[in-house]
Image: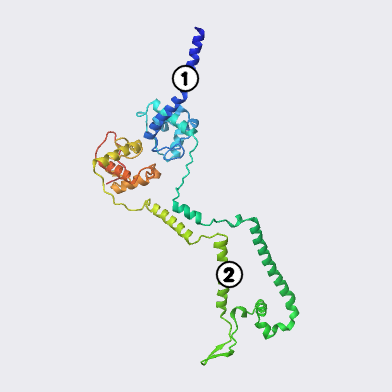
Amino acid sequence: MMPLKKGALAMAAGVLLLGANPVQAQDAIAGKAVFDANCAVCHSIQTDVVGPALKDVHKRRDEAWIKKFVKNSTEMIKGGDATAKEVFEKYGKVQMPAFGAMLKDGDIDNVIAYVKQESEAPAAVVAETTPATPDATAAEAQAPAKVAFLDLPPALLMTFALAAAVLLLIVITLVVLFRLFVPMLGDSIYDEDFRASFAGRVLFLMRGDATLFTGKATDVIHSNHDFDGIQEYDNDLPPWWKTMFYVSIVFAIGYMLYYHVFHTGALQEEEYAQEMQQAALFSAKANNDPNAKTDYKVLTDATALENGKKTFIQNCAACHGQEAQGGVGPNLTDEYWLHGGDVNEVFHTVKFGVPAKGMVAWQGKLGKDQILEVSSYILSLQGSNPANAKEPQGEKK
């Protein structure tokens, strides 16, 4: 009998150990359902929303404190609980709804199990990839690969460096020779022939004579340039013309290096693609412009209002009450409105939220049709006079 009992005990212990993880997982699954139905409106695991992020909250707070806070945070704040008051002050003095009448201890335990599971799970990294079309793939294959200047082969970089050093050496050599040989010319530098030469003009430019840029009008007629009585003077080309010509040469070299050698700048096709992308961003932002005017009409058909009711119960009831009687948020069944009671004003409030007062912006979670349905459902509740309605807030419509 003894060995039998020991074997039975060992088997029972093994079954319990094997069953621990599935039970805990089952608790987390049930907790996720409770969390999504009651908590997800104001809380996220990883980021702050209306309330704080809940990651590792079981490590920061005692579970008994968490249960008490979930059941009635207002009572804890009024009772002087320092941690509860700190959370209340930090998150815009938005009170958490009291869930004591809605959630049992087991429900809260399941939510804590879900938070534990999500806190320990590694953050998921989603790589967004755009499938390439055959045309795009062919275009990419034909397009020349771009290489940054510093990524060029070392031998080519050394060639550029040597070329730059040679040019610099030539300039230095010319300056040194100029300074050595000009004094040797003596008074011959004032001869008309020398002054008219390029070297003479450069020399006298350094001495303040700007003939190199302004040119010289000799007013001498070409002896052999006489056609039908039309004569040509042997004057210099306009200096501005020559300057622009030389500048265009320098610009052309710089353009070629910038766009076609080093591939630093974007060519026309790339600029067009960038501008189209920017235009797409502007277009997307225009759809989310809080100042944009809308002209929606209240939906009255039963299907739309039923859909709006489901959306309201799932997302809005946690703060406004199951019957929109008000809670953390205002009463939505009376004639008073904080941000306007027209369907377009309600739509705007639901879509963009009121972050300063803890109202979540739902545009990232609900589509346009869903927001219009829930806005219409809210307006259909006007005058329903639910029990325990919150006192009026705002202005009468």
Q: How many marks?
A: 2
Quadrant housing residue 25 = top left
Q: Position of residue 20 (x, y in %)?
A: 47, 23
Three-letter amino acid code of the residue under disc 2 = Val
Q: Is residue 389 left or right of residue 174?
A: left
Which residue extends farthest right? 184
Q: Position of residue 379 (x, y in %)?
A: 27, 43
Residue at the spot 48% in from the left edge and 28% down from the top edge: 62
Which residue extends farthest top? 1
Quadrant housing residue 233 = bottom right
Residue 339 visible: no
* Up-down relation of residue 350 to residue 108 (above or below): below
Residue 65 visible: yes
* Up-down relation of residue 12 to residue 122 (above or below): above
* Up-down relation of residue 171 to residue 56 (above or below): below
In this view of the protein, which residue sits in the foreground, 318 or 388? 318
Secondary structure type for disc 2 = helix
- Which residue matches tag 1? 16
- Which residue matches tag 2? 250
Q: Position of residue 376 (x, y in %)?
A: 28, 43
Three-letter amino acid code of the residue under disc 1 = Leu
Q: Position of residue 234 (x, y in %)?
A: 58, 86
Secondary structure type for disc 1 = helix
Residue at the spot 72% in from the left edge and 72% down from the top edge: 176
